[in-house]
Amino acid sequence: MPDELMTTFEKLWVALRAAWCDNHDLNGALAFSHDSAAMDFFHRVVQVNVEDTQVDRLIDDAIRLFQEKKYDCMFTLSPLDHPADLGERLEKRGFTEGMLASAMVYDPPTAPPPAETVAEIDVSPDSEYDLWADVMCRGFGHDQTMGEVGRDVLIVPEVRRYLARVDGAPAGTTLIYSQFGMGYVDHVATLPEHRRKGIAAAMIARAVADSQAMGNRWTTLETTTGSNAERIYQRQGFRIAYHRKRYIMPHG
């Protein structure tokens, strides 16, 4: 039986992504898309639960949806999805396995040392959302579309945004999203000129402390397995709870 942390993480991740995107019921799975944003962040098939005899029908429906929208078709699979051999079935249909994603939970064996940084980290008010979004997009190297489409999703009571400043100048962002007794850290971005100053670690530590103060049972995040970001999070007291697999069929 899947553990409660996993089921809650999947529930929260899907709820957050669903708020960003258009939702499509594939009769056994949920698909996300966004007509104004080409990033794969906005285009996924998740929560697969079908009988073996329905797998090919589901795959056909997903391919058709994303071909019509002219986007890659991507499945993000968790250990909760059914059938268990869905990844193999996708590969037989021409999908390629992408990078693993690590679902991580804050669970330090000992308290990590205090993060040392030259930055001042404050909760970012709604009135400076445009500034926060600009710094976030520049930190990730995104165009401004992500900030624009995220406005209605990220200015809500469940989200607390943070802006790091160095000598008064914006330097980085993060946020904590709280729901279902779980805090989810996201959008950890540092501007290139301010990297290697401990800013990301300090922002994460602030988000974790606030998540715990809110009474969340867990504080979690997701990142690419084996990445530099994953190593930063591990040093901050996060461990890998489980992996999520991605399968991709490029458009065209």
Image (spheres, grey):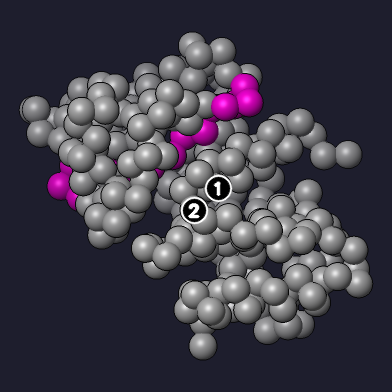
* Residue 120 appearing in the image: yes
Nearest the viewer among 182 and 202 is: 182
Mark drawn on residue 18: 1
Nearest the viewer among 209 and 137 is: 137
Q: Is residue 109 left or right of residue 209?
A: right
In the rendered image, residue 20, in percent from the top left (x then y), is placed at 46, 48
In the rendered image, residue 164, in percent from the top left (x then y), is placed at 23, 30
Q: Is residue 38 left or right of residue 169?
A: right
| Dot 1 amino acid type | Ala
Q: State which quarter of the image contains the N terminus.
A: top right
Residue for point 91% across, 72% down: 53
Q: Quadrant of residue 116?
A: top left
Q: Kindly check if marks 1 and 2 are in contact, taking CB atoms under 8 A apart as contact.
A: yes
Nearest the viewer among 33 and 249 is: 33
Q: Which residues are magenta?
A: 179-195
Residue for point 72% across, 38% down: 6
* SS type, badge 2: loop
Residue for point 47% across, 26% down: 158
Residue 21 in magenta stretch: no
- Residue where numbered disc 2 is placed: 21
Question: What is the spatial separation of the Cα atoms under label 1 and label 2, in whole angstroms?
Answer: 5 Å
Please rate how many residues cluster around mark 2, counting C-alpha atoms within 10 Å: few if below 14, some from 14 to 19, many from 20: many
| Dot 2 amino acid type | Cys
In the rendered image, residue 86, in percent from the top left (x then y), is placed at 79, 67
* Residue 196 appearing in the image: no
